[in-house]
Amino acid sequence: MSPSPRHFAQGLAVYLEPLFDGLYEALMKQLTVDPALFQIPGDETGAAGFMETWTRVLREQTARARERVDASHEAS
């Protein structure tokens, strides 16, 4: 049986929900103990700035990895 993309996404969300709920709770506890937990030294944007930087770095790393894969396919 092949689930539709919607059914797959719903099933995945149901499966991951407890994991993400636990992660959220753990992060909120850590943030309560240390409000500067998600701050980059010298950056006053706080958690939002941390997430923006983290997301940007992940996208840059993904782009570089794709370029390496494409280059290795072109070389073969």
Image (cartoon, rainbow, N blue to C red):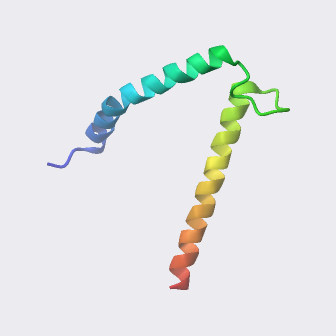
Residue 66 locus on image (x, y percent): 56, 64
Q: Toward which corner of the image does residue 70 lie, by quadrant?
A: bottom right
Q: Residue at x 73, y 23 (%)?
A: 36
Vertical placement of 16 versus 8: above or below?
above
Q: Residue at x 69, y 25 (%)?
A: 37
Residue 44 locus on image (x, y percent): 82, 26
Vertical placement of 33 versus 20: above or below?
above
Q: 7 or 62, which lies in front?
A: 62
Q: 19 or 57, which lies in front?
A: 19
Q: Toward which corner of the image does residue 31 lie, by quadrant?
A: top right
Residue, far bottom: 76
Q: Toward which corner of the image does residue 60 lie, by quadrant?
A: bottom right
Residue, far right: 42
- Describe residue 45's horizontal placement relative to residue 47 as left or right: right
Vertical placement of 64 versus 11: above or below?
below
Q: Residue at x 63, y 55 (%)?
A: 61
Q: 10 or 33, which lies in front?
A: 33
Q: Residue at x 37, y 25 (%)?
A: 18
Residue 22 locus on image (x, y percent): 44, 23
Residue 72 locus on image (x, y percent): 54, 77
Residue, far left: 1
- The tally of labels here is 0
